[in-house]
Image (cartoon, rainbow, N blue to C red):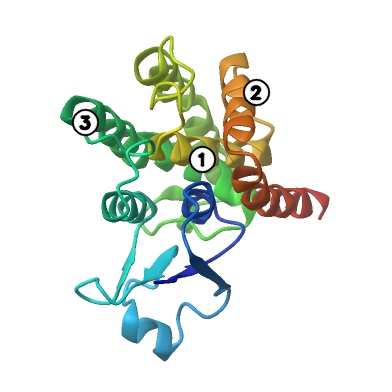
Amino acid sequence: MTIKLKVLKPSVNNMSVRVFVRAAGLDFEESDVYGATRTPEFLARNPAHMTPMIEEAGLPKGVMWESCAIMQYLSNKHHLEKFYPTDPAKRAMVDSAMFYLIGTLYPYVARATYPTLKFPQYPGEVGASSADDEAKKAAAKAATDALAEPLEVFRSFYIDDKPFIGGDHASIADIRLAATLEFLAAIDYPLPAWAKSYIARMEKDLGAAYSEPAADVRGYIGWVRSQ
């Protein structure tokens, strides 16, 4: 059965699932829903108005969102062991890496890059407040400065002496991490050498499955920086 995938192409959250379905060789149909996520039709199916979203008849509500959850679900359904190991200890490391990314690394990435990317920031944060420009710049700088620690955690703990978090082959946690790192080009963040090599390995390992969705993110970053 064809997976219906709804995406926003400039987003690295969306890029993760776009890379995954291609790398896994799944049968999918992709639609760009830019500007349509707040329509009554979309909200009736997805009240969180979030992407990426997949539609599948077998799901309890017919749809689901959240990039990591989608990759976990599709890996389980299609028995994609190489992307999401079934061994409990190996799977725990993949899950831990994804949760650490979502809970710690990505919030810093968002606060550091969203002002440049012209993405709306989250309510309650300095960037979305009525604070003056200097305060917003200081908040973005603080987030940028904080990136080094979680990046080092990924290098020293999750990847260590392996090519990927998943070992010899990229896992769903690797797809999520590599996609996230793409946004740092928006602010000319000085990626450490290991991270540059890691992205290159991901692109070599996954080929066009990675490079094609990455081109949309990179193209958007290039467009923003040219304005």
Left-right relation of 154 to 180: left
Residue 25 visible here: yes
18 vs 180: above or below: below
Q: Secondary structure at mark 2?
A: loop
Q: Quadrant of residue 44?
A: bottom left
Name the residue tied to disc 3: 92
Measured Cα–Cα span from mark 2 to mark 1: 14 Å
Name the residue tied to disc 2: 190
Left-right relation of 21 to 74: right
Q: Nearer the viewer, residue 61 or 207?
A: 207
Question: Comparing marks 3 and 1, which lies closer to the viewer?
Answer: 3
Residue 50 visible here: no
What is the crowding at mark 1: few (fewer than 14 residues within 10 Å), some, or many (at least 20)? many
Name the residue tied to disc 1: 180
Measured Cα–Cα span from mark 3 to mark 2: 30 Å
211 vs 49: above or below: above
Question: Comparing marks 2 and 1, which lies closer to the viewer?
Answer: 1
What is the crowding at mark 3: few (fewer than 14 residues within 10 Å), some, or many (at least 20)? some
Mark before the other along the chain sequence, 2 or 1: 1
